[in-house]
């Protein structure tokens, strides 16, 4: 089930919200939140089972395993300290083993088959939706219990709710247990927070349906062709559309997740901060997929030594983190190279280029450099294989006409949406930030904003009814 579907918008979500509202009338606080949590847990399991009952069993297995490992780590901490590290090691193996089996088994089998020049005839492993997200959440919980940062959760239902909570289950943001520990037991639900949640959800839905889906069709058309057939203009249009698509698709999902969380009283971490306004690659990664960057920083970069063990180790640690970031995204050499190249650019900026960027007075040059790097590396993220990616990038700079030109790839409506996407991925917000701060609390602005939200919702529904193109890019991770 996806947020941008009629089933979710008009059946699933209203039922879950209505039940949550009804439980608010229970006077006993403990009973009230017990009922609310049961409602959310059941809804989350149903939501995830919509992608397949087999997926649900995998997630429940992950929850159960991490629940038990945390209990054992906690018990060993008190009575059998010398076994604590061993239990923790098995917990990591358990989680990483789940990821390896479901995400990388097909990849390694295909490599072995190509080397051996034979087909083993093994059944393809089906990838559960969002497995990387809920596995990282569950793993962070066990790590924090091991480090003594959080108390072991002995209530299985609360831990299951933390891992499976449907607003951020399949595509984040990745939420640490410590961030929602108290909210799972008791949270504040207000009319103001609920209306904020609705607003955030609608704007996120609009990002996804009105922008990402429209330009995504252009990207799909361009990347379905062999690079040799593309003209230079068409190649640039294709990757520009994909760059806008992936930002509005993923940030739109995060907005919807944060909005849904607010409707139920939760506060989730922000996941994006206008990354396409970044003026360095390092700055880009402070703004893009913030929850993933924070996860790798806290659980990989810092344990490796961070920047505390000299410059050389800092560079190695940075490279390792982004190598793992690429691997996390998928079992393909394209993702591996995507992570490797980001690691290289970050090391270069740490070595000397970052200082030049800071001193440079012409910040537009910094921005152009950053966007060029980001856009070129999105080619690897989107391409089916490494050879295709290099050939595609070659087409972007060979200035040939090709058999497929710009008019064959994009129409006027798609041009308009692409332009709006480019303007509203940061430039417009920055240009009118002061004006917005002055008028956001005005009554007339509230009414205008409310009417605009209704208009966006209606337009989203119309587009969803009339289109079958509605992918979520990060569901594959």
Image (cartoon, rainbow, N blue to C red):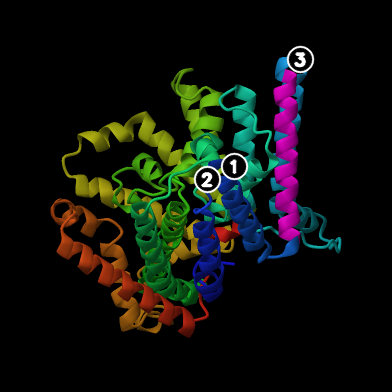
Image disc number at residue 79: 3
**Where 308 sits versus 151, above or below?**
above
Is there CB contact under 8 Å for labels 1 and 2?
Answer: yes
Q: Is residue 470 visible?
A: yes
Q: Is residue 237 left or right of residue 132?
A: left
User: Residue 465, percent across and down?
Assistant: 48, 83
Whole-angstrom CA distance, mark 1 to mark 2, is 6 Å
**What residue lies at 47% left-to-right and 78% top-to-bottom?**
464
Magenta range is 54-76
Q: Secondary structure at mark 2?
A: loop
Is there CB contact under 8 Å for labels 2 and 3?
Answer: no
User: Residue 102, percent across and down?
Assistant: 72, 53
Q: Earlier in the sequence, mark 2 or mark 3?
A: 3
Task: Name the residue that disc number 1 marks.
Answer: 137
> Quadrant of the rendered structure where residue 202 is?
bottom left
Report crowding for label 1: few under 14, some 14 to 19, many 20 or more residues within 10 A (C-alpha).
many
Whole-angstrom CA distance, mark 2 to mark 3, is 32 Å
Task: Name the residue that disc number 2 marks.
Answer: 174
> Quadrant of the rendered structure where residue 30 is?
top right
Which residue appears farthest toward the front when viewing the image? 27
């Amino acid at each position: 089930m996806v947020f941008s579907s009629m089933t979710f918008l008009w059946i699933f979500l209203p039922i879950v919200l209505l039940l949550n509202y009804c439980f608010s009338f229970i006077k006993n606080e403990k009973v009230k939140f017990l009922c609310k949590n049961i409602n959310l847990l059941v809804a989350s399991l149903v939501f995830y089972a919509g992608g397949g009952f087999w997926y649900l069993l995998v997630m429940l297995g992950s929850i159960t395993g991490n629940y038990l490992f945390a209990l054992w780590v906690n018990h060993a901490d008190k009575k059998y300290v010398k076994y604590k590290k061993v239990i923790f090691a098995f917990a990591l193996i358990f989680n990483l083993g789940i990821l390896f089996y479901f995400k990388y088994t097909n990849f390694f089998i295909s490599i072995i088959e190509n080397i051996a020049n034979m087909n083993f005839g093994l059944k393809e492993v089906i990838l559960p939706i969002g497995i990387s997200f809920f596995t990282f959440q569950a793993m962070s919980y066990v790590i924090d219990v091991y480090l003594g940062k959080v108390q072991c959760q002995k209530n299985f239902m609360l831990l299951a709710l933390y891992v499976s909570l449907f607003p951020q289950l399949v595509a984040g943001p990745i939420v640490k247990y410590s961030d929602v520990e108290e909210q799972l037991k008791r949270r504040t639900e207000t009319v103001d927070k609920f209306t904020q949640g609705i607003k955030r959800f609608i704007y996120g839905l609009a990002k996804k349906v009105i922008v990402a889906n429209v330009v995504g069709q252009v990207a799909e058309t361009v990347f379905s062709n062999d690079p040799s057939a593309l003209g230079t203009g068409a190649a640039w249009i294709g990757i520009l559309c994909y760059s806008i698509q992936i930002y509005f698709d993923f940030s739109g999902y995060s907005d919807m997740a944060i909005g849904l969380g607010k409707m139920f009283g939760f506060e989730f971490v922000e996941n994006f901060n206008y990354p396409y306004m970044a003026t360095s690659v390092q700055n880009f990664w402070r703004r893009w997929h913030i929850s993933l960057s924070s996860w790798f920083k806290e659980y990989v970069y810092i344990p490796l030594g961070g920047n505390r063990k000299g410059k050389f180790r800092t560079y190695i640690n940075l490279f390792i983190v982004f190598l793992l970031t690429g691997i996390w995204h998928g079992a393909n050499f394209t993702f591996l190279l995507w992570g490797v190249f980001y690691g290289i650019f970050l090391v270069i900026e740490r070595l000397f280029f970052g200082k030049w960027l800071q001193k440079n007075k012409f910040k537009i040059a910094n921005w152009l450099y950053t966007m060029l790097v980001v856009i070129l590396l999105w080619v690897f993220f989107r391409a089916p294989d490494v050879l295709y990616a290099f050939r595609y990038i070659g087409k972007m700079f060979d200035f040939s006409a090709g058999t497929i030109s710009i008019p064959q790839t994009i129409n006027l409506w798609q041009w308009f949406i692409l332009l709006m996407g480019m303007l509203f991925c940061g430039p417009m917000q920055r240009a009118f930030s002061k004006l917005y701060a002055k008028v956001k609390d005005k009554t007339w602005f509230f009414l205008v904003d409310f009417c605009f939200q209704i208009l966006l919702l209606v337009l989203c529904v119309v587009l969803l009814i009339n289109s079958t193109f509605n992918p979520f890019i990060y569901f594959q991770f």
